[in-house]
Amino acid sequence: MDAACVRRWLDDVAAGVRAERDHLTQLDAAIGDADHGVNMNRGFTVAMAKVAALDGATPGQLVTVVGRTLISTVGGAAGPLYGTAFLQAGEALGRSETFGPERLLQALEAALAGIQGIGAASEGDKTMVDALAPAVAAFDAELRSANGSLESAVGRASAAATEGMRATIPMQARKGRASYLGPRSVGHQDPGATSTALILDALAQVVLGGGASAGKVQAAPPRRR
Amino acid sequence: MTDTRPGRPDDERTLIQSVSRAARILKALGSDTSRLGVTELAARLDLKKATVYGLLRTLEAHQLVEQDVETGKYRLGPALLQLGNAYLDNHELRARSLLWAESLATRAGEAVHVGVLTGRSVLIVHHVFRPDDSVQILEVGASIPWHACALGKAIVAHLGPGEQRELLAEPLSKLTGRTLTDPAAFGRELGRVRREGLATERQEAIVGEAGIAAPLFGARGVVVGAIGVSGPVEHLLPDGPPAATVTAVKEVARGLSRELGGGRSAPSLGA
């Protein structure tokens, strides 16, 4: 993968967040502050303007600038969590012009470690970790398997993230504001897990499809009603 | 699993066993698994199935539990909501804090919570939304681990040394990467809170959120709860807490304490 590919991925993430803004906010309204979609959209809009202005940047630099922008523009928990995830991933990608699946795995692992360092969340707490952790594990397992490739690994990771996202519905939140609701948080899909699944789906689409960015991210979150 | 709480050294032998068992059933149904069958409850509480069944039938007759028609499992019943509301309505601190909390929210421009210590958690008895048009969820009735919120630190810092030791003796759970969990460091934090009469919390309960709180004193200078503001960490605690917010929290806490009968003794460190 190279910088052009990373740009396509970030474009797709931004487009997906824009398209899903109301859906994410609606999910957040059930168990949080009803600002996740709006915040993420604002953050990615600003971030993409900075990415567009960065000529000749390496993949690591692009991802890092997104992280820095998210930290400073996205409020609530999502800013520090996603911001740190992108910062750590950017650092893991290093300074090279291109990277392969092994390096991508390290970046995903670094993102997960960053999120867990800040949020102290484990799988089952009804957070973005419930989408990201299984995705990282699936990516790793697929890469280690006999026919594992970058393509098959991102495909598995995206599917695992979506499955993990859906699995948050029956969970009772144990982290964040949603945990204050106790049993009332049961029955709602976690907005953070949903945006994480969207980001990984966009990654899979870019790696697998390679082409134009419009209209592909729709597969990520199930559009209820 | 025991359900005895600090400060409640009730001897099991002086209690009525069946009432205790019924209470344990209600607490189990109110914990993380909200629907439980007779077999699961019996296993969890180490009781005979017939005993659990009899207790559930009795609780059901009083609408304190109800049975799910489809699964046959039990869950908490509607009578508990009425009791919960009645508890809050009769809560003296809540009743007295309404106007004070409103004025603090207006002055500070942030959400206000009033809480009391129950066991190892702070129970939110009153919540005023941040005075803007944003969507917020009412957090009255929420329980927050005492060590992760400014309200809990403000209260515990003004308890006696014995009670503090007891609370610090049990492991402090990690809610975020910034939650203070080291008992020794926490002891120092409580000392600081007590000296300053003000507690702060920075992303220790929820990532991105902070809180500033001051203790509330009742008659004889006993700490009865705390009042405080909470909101985005970048507003509330950019570096140190903004002086105007600190003043507002302290003044409101002092005024409300006076009304609760703890006015004169409040500022003293209650040796």
Image: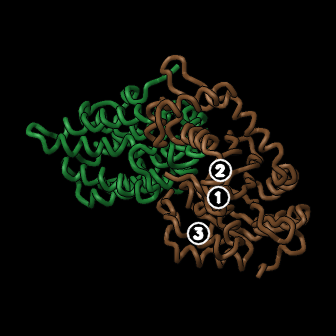
Q: Is residue B234 visible?
A: no
Query: What's the mark number on residue B15?
Result: 2
Residue B173 at what x, y percent from top left?
Answer: 49, 60
Q: Is residue A158 visible?
A: yes
Chain of the residue that carries numbered disc 3 in the rendered image: B
Say which element carries label 3.
Answer: helix
Say which element carries label 2.
Answer: loop
Q: Is residue A94 left or right of residue A174?
A: left
Q: CA distance from mark 3 to mark 1?
A: 16 Å
Q: Amino acid at mark 3?
A: Glu
Letter of the green chain: A
Chain of the residue that carries numbered disc 1 in the rendered image: B
Q: Residues within 10 Å of mark 1 (few under 14, many from 20)?
A: few
Say yes or no: labels 3 and 1 on the same chain: yes
Query: What's the mark number on residue B166?
Result: 3
Q: Amino acid at mark 2?
A: Leu
The residue depicted at 48 percent of the width and 60 percent of the height is B174
Reading the chain from its start, which is encountered first: label 1 or label 2? Answer: 1
Say which element carries label 1.
Answer: loop
Residue A214 at what x, y percent from top left?
Answer: 39, 28
Reading the chain from its start, which is encountered first: label 3 or label 1? Answer: 1
- Of residues A179 and B224, which is closer to you in this image? B224
Evaluate if marks 1 and 2 touch, with contact meaning CB atoms under 8 Å apart: yes
- Name the quarter where the C terminus of chain B is drawn: bottom right
State the residue position of label 1: B10
Letter of the brown chain: B
In the rendered image of this protein, does residue B114 appear above or below residue A206?
below
Q: CA distance from mark 2 to mark 3?
A: 23 Å
Residue A112 at what x, y percent from top left?
Answer: 35, 52
The residue mark sitting in front, 2 or 3, is: 2
Reading the chain from its start, which is encountered first: label 2 or label 3? Answer: 2
Q: Amino acid at mark 1?
A: Asp
